[in-house]
Amino acid sequence: RGSGATGMARRSGAARQLAAPPRAVPGPGSPPERPVVGDVQSGSLSPDLAPDVFFLRVRLEDTGEMFRVTNCHGDMTVRELKEELDLMVGIPFNLQRLQYLDQGVLMDGATLKFHDVVPGGIVSLCIWHYDGWTELVVAAVEGDPSKLSCVGVSEDCYYRTPNSERFRDEEWRQWRAQRAFVALYITSHRGHAEATQYLLEQGANSLGRSPLGRTPLHVAAAMGRLDCISLLFKWGALIHNRDAKGETPISIARRLNRKQSVWRMFLLHWLAQSRSVDAKDVTVTVKKALKGVKAGAGPTRKTPH
């Protein structure tokens, strides 16, 4: 009886071993096992195991806007990320303050891997809180001319900051011109045509440049803001101005597949060169020329008979 019980126990143990799925033993040349999606351990993905190229989410804390930034990688520096945000978020490079998780400021020269930024993570973008820049950025993002008129972008505005209180004459004019340009940069990026028109009428420079050499036309073209593109051209914007990376508004629009932006700028440039249309009628003429053209369609080419 004892030997029978022992035999049954052995058979039961063998059955349990057969029921368990076989575990593959990696060979000498086999790749290391990857974490399974949904596995508890995969929730804390090490930067060393991150994919080569990934996306990040960036939240502009002062407005609540969320942006998706693609083509990020572990060796990307914080400065390189800021340069991309200058174009994709429309906030000039020098006003950006980036934070991640512990709310510490990310250092420009460090990489995303150094700061343990994981794929799909949320990076906070804040505006430096000095000289009233936060109030100006929020007003420009909203695109309300009445609010913009109260943040120091026009000559008849009594808005002052502790820094600007000491400015006189030319220094004050330069301070105001810089604020008007930043506001124009943001409204052009967001597509606020009414606010863009207001700023241009107040003297904002359509040919002004951000620290990265970009004009309002660069960001308007990048985002496909056709009405703002037309307004900027009306006030002297040029398609051949290059930024610090050598990109023009045309080349940026092409890279981002903004085909309508490309055709709008080519048409406006041609009209300006030919001087066949009065500047006040440019917008009307463009709308007529592009009426009925499908998004992304180019001019038709006649085939020889």
Image: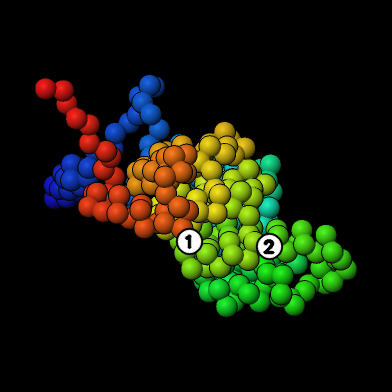
Using the rendered image of the protein, determine whether residue 195 is visible from the camera's viewpoint: yes
- State the count of labels: 2
Seen at 47% across and 39% down, the residue is 273
In this orientation, which residue lies closer to the viewer: 202 or 60?
202
Say which element carries label 1: helix
Give x and y (percent) for residue 121: 49, 55
Name of the residue lying farthest toward the left = 305
Give x and y (percent) for residue 238: 54, 43
- Say left or right for 271 vs 292: right
- Mark 1–mark 2 Cα distance, whole angstroms, equals 17 Å
**What label does residue 179 carry, if any?**
2
Seen at 57% across and 56% down, the residue is 185
Say which element carries label 2: helix
Local packing at callout 2 (Cα closer than 10 Å; few below 14, some 14-19, many 20+) is many
Please, which colouring scheme is shown? rainbow
In this orientation, which residue lies closer to the viewer: 244 or 30?
244
- Whichever of callouts 1 and 2 sits on the residue coming sooner in the sequence is 2
Give x and y (percent) for residue 92: 62, 53
Local packing at callout 1 (Cα closer than 10 Å; few below 14, some 14-19, many 20+) is many
In this orientation, which residue lies closer to the viewer: 68 or 281?
281
Q: Quadrant of residue 101?
A: bottom right
**What label does residue 190 carry, if any?**
1
Give x and y (percent) for residue 193: 47, 64
- Say left or right for 11 vs 240: left
Quadrant for the C terminus in the image: top left
